[in-house]
């Protein structure tokens, strides 16, 4: 199994609508469950502690590295990324690893 973890910081201009943006990211990404082959689980966390310097975290698991690669270009994922994530985020840090 492969874990795919991403941390995002929102753009400064999204600060006034921060909660709505975070909910949009969460709903969009979590809606991919059951739509993409090899995606085992997907969770988006939006309520970090005050000590956090990221606004949103994606915690997902895939059957293998090939499934992760397929997810990256899957039309359903690309649609969510292009409409609910990329327009609102300024930084992205990713770590993928096998467990």
Image (cartoon, rainbow, N blue to C red):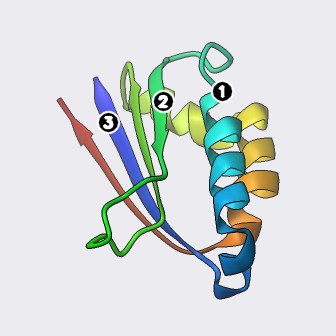
Residue at the (70%, 34%) spot, across then down? 74
x, y percent for residue 31:
68, 27
Q: Residue furthest left?
A: 99
Dot in front, 2 or 3: 2
Q: Indicate which disc, 2 or 1, sits on the residue closer to the N terminus.
A: 1
The residue carrying mark 3 is 3
Judge from the rendering whether residue 37 lies leftward or rightward of residue 61; answer left or right.
Answer: right
Q: Which mark is residue 42?
A: 2
For residue 14, side relative to residue 5 (left or right): right
x and y percent of residue 47 in the render?
A: 43, 53
Quadrant of the image containing the N terminus: top left
Q: Which residue is mark 1?
A: 32
Q: Could you tell me how far apart the alpha carbons at marks 2 and 1 are, in whole angstroms?
A: 8 Å
- Mark 3: few/some/many CA within 10 Å (<14, 14-19, 20+): many
Question: Image height check: is 68 above or below 11?
Answer: above
Crowding around mark 2 (Cα neighbors within 10 Å: few <14, some 14 to 19, many 20+) is many
Q: Residue at x 66, y 48 (%)?
A: 23
Quick one: label 3 or label 1, which is nearer the N terminus?
3
Q: Earlier in the sequence, mark 2 or mark 3?
A: 3
């Amino acid at each position: 199994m492969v874990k795919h973890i991403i941390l995002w910081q929102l753009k400064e201009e999204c600060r006034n609508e921060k909660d709505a943006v975070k909910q949009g990211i969460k709903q969009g990404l979590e809606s991919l469950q059951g739509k993409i082959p090899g995606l085992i689980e997907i969770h988006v966390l939006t309520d970090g502690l005050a000590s956090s310097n990221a606004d949103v975290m994606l915690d997902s698991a895939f059957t293998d590295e090939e499934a992760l690669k397929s997810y990256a270009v899957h039309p359903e994922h690309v649609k969510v990324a292009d409409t609910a994530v990329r327009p609102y985020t300024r930084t992205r840090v990713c770590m993928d690893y096998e467990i």
